[in-house]
Image: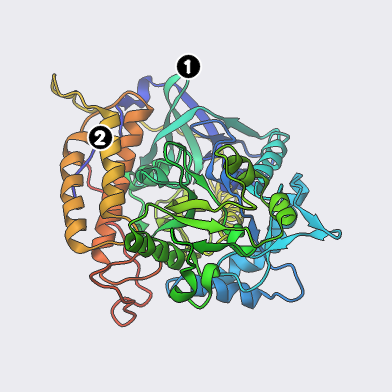
């Protein structure tokens, strides 16, 4: 694997502006804010996020949060559903931990001010693909993430020990003698500076923008994963990118997620000829887990030579449909689609990175002083495929664990903060070697769709690996002066880790499907994870 610079930019701690905090939290989604709220009030917390504080994957979550709340449901049911979806790669102890903590975390969100939908004085529950019972709480119909983040952000802003900085790009994690001690960041109007912290919590989200077709907002460029990798943290299971089966597909428009809950409420998937195809693919039909549905759609699109399939809600109660899915109705209506009558054109899109920074059951990474929570991590909860609506609860549970663990670690440290004499010097690029960053980014995202998509095969993966090796050789060795260049370098780093992992796992499991190894192979793989090769810095 190509070597790269340890830090993306040049700096010298002796002449750079400094900022100090007890706890530095990178990312202001639900995992990051939940971590901040768990830190005791006598410790200072600085939360940094590269865009507006409202701009995270958490805010865009439509379906809801999974948690056992009805008398017909049990923790054992939720655990078993998670294990089945994870296709043999979940850590059962982690699954038990998160599932049993879920109802408490939902109550905490209500305490923070979240207003979930209700029916007959009780929280309304719906069902999604892979779930055996109705256990998904939701808000504003299909805008759960928006409402949850609205309330949590407002609550966090009442805490005097928490400061939130938006428009702050985390370029790299600072390390000294193998331990994380802060970050080098760039903030609008302030340039580059160093944040020193006794403990750092990484909650920076996923990397969906590595694909051309994605449900993710533009901020999801894998910055935290790449920074952790350069800092020496172990990443694992990077082959497991979950594709959401149903993304609104209208030529020329932005892609829009059509929630799993639409199928949970009874919508059918049909091909261009109007035929349902899911019952022939899986006995669970449209309620099969996401990886099964996404592959069935992919095969149907190939068979019919049509760029999409269709969601059909025409047989459902129109009043229920409009009340339950106001956001989806609003978007579809802007394209002249009546979701109570018209078929909705959809196709799969990159949605959630199941792999990421390896963490233990407390949220600790392999780098001392660095914790992580949420989509940036591989915790063992999701295995090879995330069960719908388990991600928000993972962020809440592990955010809580990280905030608590970081605070406990600080109690054992000296009171004084320390700034270390760290420096980075990147040689200037040769003259006349400028790069068209937009063109390279488009090429990368297109390559990932073609050769690292829903269906993979060794020859295409090797071709992608060679393309990435060439691009990385000249793009990772130079220094860029802004977010566009740094995001490109991070996505190149993540893409090559994903391709290497996909080549290594010569079986099919969960979201990873190899057409040349189409069967799950428990004898050779079992519970084995694929750990990414250690980072190698340019000398």
Residue corresponding to mark 2: 440
| Residue at the limit of the structure toward the bottom, as seen here | 523
Give the percent coordinates (x, y) of residue 350.
42, 51
Residue 448 vs residue 45, the one in the foreground: 448
Secondary structure under tag 1 reads: loop
Report the residue at 62% width, 65% height from top.
266
Give the percent coordinates (x, y) of residue 360.
47, 62
Work out whether 336 lies above or below 275. above
> Residue 189 got which mark?
1
Residue 306 vs residue 160, the one in the foreground: 306
Q: CA distance from mark 2 to mark 1?
A: 28 Å
Left or right relative to 419: residue 43: right
Q: Earlier in the sequence, mark 2 or mark 1?
A: 1
Q: Nearer the viewer, mark 2 or mark 1?
A: 2
Quarter residue 29 falls in: top right
Left or right relative to 144: residue 378: left
Report the residue at 44% width, 73% height from top.
87
Work out whether 169 lies above or below 395. above
Kindly tell me whether residue 32 is visible in this rendering. Answer: no
């Amino acid at each position: 694997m190509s070597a790269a610079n340890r830090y993306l930019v040049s700096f010298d701690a002796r002449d750079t502006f400094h900022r100090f905090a007890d706890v530095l939290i990178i990312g202001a989604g639900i995992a990051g804010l939940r971590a901040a709220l768990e830190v005791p009030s006598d410790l200072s917390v600085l939360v940094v996020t590269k865009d507006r504080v409202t701009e995270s994957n958490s805010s865009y979550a439509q379906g809801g949060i999974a948690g056992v709340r009805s008398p017909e449901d049990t923790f054992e049911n939720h655990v078993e559903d998670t294990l089945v979806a994870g296709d043999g790669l979940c850590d059962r102890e982690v699954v038990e931990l998160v599932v049993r903590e879920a109802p408490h975390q939902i109550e905490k969100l209500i305490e923070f001010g979240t207003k979930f939908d209700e029916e007959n004085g009780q929280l309304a529950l719906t069902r999604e693909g892979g779930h055996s019972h109705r256990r998904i709480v939701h808000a504003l119909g299909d805008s759960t993430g928006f409402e949850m983040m609205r309330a949590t952000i407002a609550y966090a802003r009442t805490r005097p020990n928490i400061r939130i900085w938006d428009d702050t790009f985390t370029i790299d994690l600072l390390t000294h003698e193998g331990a994380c001690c802060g970050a080098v960041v760039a903030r609008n109007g302030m340039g580059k500076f160093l944040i020193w912290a006794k403990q750092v919590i990484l909650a920076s989200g996923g990397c969906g923008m590595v694909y051309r077709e994605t449900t993710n907002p533009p901020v999801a460029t894998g910055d935290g994963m790449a920074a952790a990798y350069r800092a020496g943290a172990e990443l694992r299971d990077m082959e497991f990118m979950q594709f959401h089966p149903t993304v609104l597909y209208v030529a020329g428009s932005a892609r829009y997620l059509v929630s799993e809950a639409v199928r949970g409420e009874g919508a059918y998937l049909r091909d261009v000829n109007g035929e349902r195809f899911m019952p022939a693919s899986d006995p669970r039909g449209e309620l099969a887990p996401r990886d099964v549905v996404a592959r069935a759609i992919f095969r149907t699109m190939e068979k019919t030579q049509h760029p999409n399939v269709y969601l059909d809600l025409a047989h459902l109660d129109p009043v229920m449909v409009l009340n339950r899915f106001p956001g989806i109705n609003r978007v579809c209506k802007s394209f002249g689609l009546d979701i109570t009558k018209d078929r909705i054109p959809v196709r799969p899109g990159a949605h959630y990175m199941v792999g990421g920074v390896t963490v233990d059951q407390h949220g600790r990474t392999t780098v001392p002083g660095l914790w992580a929570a949420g989509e940036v991590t591989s915790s063992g909860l999701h295995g090879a495929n995330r069960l719908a609506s388990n991600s928000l609860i993972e962020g809440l549970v592990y955010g809580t664990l990280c905030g608590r663990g970081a605070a406990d670690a600080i109690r054992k440290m000296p009171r004084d903060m320390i700034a270390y004499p760290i420096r980075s010097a990147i040689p200037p690029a040769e003259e006349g070697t400028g790069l068209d960053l937009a063109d390279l980014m488009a090429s990368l995202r297109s390559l990932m769709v073609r050769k690292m998509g829903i269906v993979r095969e060794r020859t295409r993966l090797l071709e992608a690996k060679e393309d990435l090796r060439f691009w990385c050789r000249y793009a990772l060795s130079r220094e860029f002066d802004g977010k566009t260049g740094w995001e490109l370098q991070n996505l190149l780093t993540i893409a090559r880790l994903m391709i290497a992992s996909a080549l290594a796992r010569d079986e099919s499991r969960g979201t990873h499907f190899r057409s040349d190894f189409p069967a799950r192979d428990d004898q050779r793989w079992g519970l084995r994870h694929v750990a990414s090769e250690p980072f190698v810095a340019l000398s």
